Amino acid sequence: MPTGDQDAATWPGPPSVRVSGPLAGPDAAAVLDLVRHAADEDGVSPLSEHVLLHLRYGGDPQARNVLLRLGDVLAGYGHLDPTDQVAGPSGEMVVHPAYRRQGLGLALGRALAAAAGDRGLRLWAHGDLPGAARLAAAAGFERTRALYQMRRSLREPLDPPRLPDGITVRTFVPGQDDEAWLELNRRAFARHPEQGAWTRADLDLREREPWFDPAGFFLAERDGRLAGFHWTKVHGRTAAAPHGHEAIGEVYVVGVDPDERGTGLGRALTLVGLHHLRDRGLQQVMLYADEDNEPAIGLYESLGFAHQGTDVMFSRPGVINPDRKAESGLRR
């Protein structure tokens, strides 16, 4: 939720706000261009992977998109996801760096709140930037959740994975393992509404991404039944995704069946993925975990990870977050 320098007198045109469903090609392209400008300025993407995927591939029909223009120039964007029936709608927003600190962030926030209706609104701010905190306070929001980004070097020694007795590990087979994996994901993240609510469409979108590689998607089995998984990701400067920064690995998501908790399977699967990423020649690996998920953070710290940055959720007073703790890794 980043919130520049131009005075309103030099705006390229009068402000206008439009709220719509899925965005057509030109509008989606303009939003992605705005996101690139903000990421270059702030050093962090203002939007989550989930939102960016829908912008690239046509959008979620239930989502609402808020476009704030100054004349013909897209100066701000907001995304509202109304689908969480437990915690209520959540939003993300960004203002172009050239037009910040001029009230446009508050205008976007009001438009998102109106679209959310009486169910309240939660806003994600990526990077825990001071401007986002100031904007949230001005709009009457309070900090209610923090998501840590953690990193470690892959040049440092790694313990060998020690699998529990009876567990075997193989890689994911698209078209064969999809439904079984979705069921395991629901069980592993039953108390984490974002991750646990994934559908086949959510999985299919990620399988279409340039970074998707089933060779880095590990499944643990016990007696032919899925017991856990570690899905790794590589992003940055690769042949599939020639970004401006060096490639970095990610512990994208680790999940363990509730029946396997306490067996050490989560740690073993994490190490399986870390060895895979190091064998690919990567130098660093990152992950996300909730600030209050002490078991997960303790596990990752024991594996050499350290806190690198924070994403923050802001909510209006009275909007309650459900318990999101899970034994294994968490995704934003």
Image: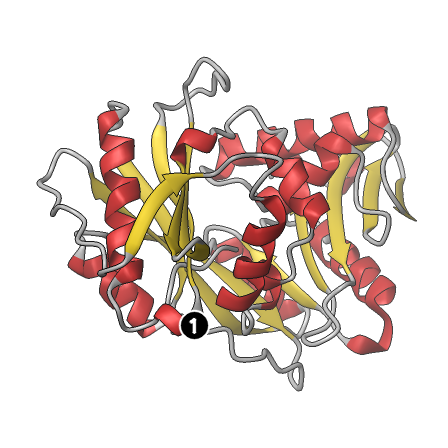
Identity of the residue drawn at 32% across and 66% down = 296
The answer to which image quadrant residue 207 occupies is top right
The answer to which image quadrant residue 263 occupies is bottom left
Label count reads 1
Residue found farthest to the top: 239
Check disc 1 and report the residue beneath it: 258
Please state which of residues 85 and 216 is positioned toward the viewer in this rendering: 216
Q: Is residue 312 left or right of residue 94?
A: left
Q: How is the image coloured?
A: secondary structure
Q: Classify 43 as above or below 223.
A: above
Residue found farthest to the bottom: 318
Identity of the residue drawn at 66% across and 77% down = 316
Question: What is the x, y in percent for residue 221?
Answer: 39, 53
Please state which of residues 296 and 11 is positioned toward the viewer in this rendering: 296
Q: Is residue 44 left or right of residue 319?
A: left
Label 1 SS: helix
Question: What is the x, y in percent for residue 318?
Answer: 66, 86
Residue found farthest to the front: 223
Q: Classify 21 as above or below 106.
A: above
Please state which of residues 153 and 165 is positioned toward the viewer in this rendering: 165
Identity of the residue drawn at 30% across and 41% down = 273
> Could you tell me the amino acid type at mark 1?
Pro
Question: What is the x, y in percent for residue 67?
Answer: 82, 42
Q: Circle 1: is it few (<14), some (14-19), or many (20+) Cα within 10 Å?
A: some
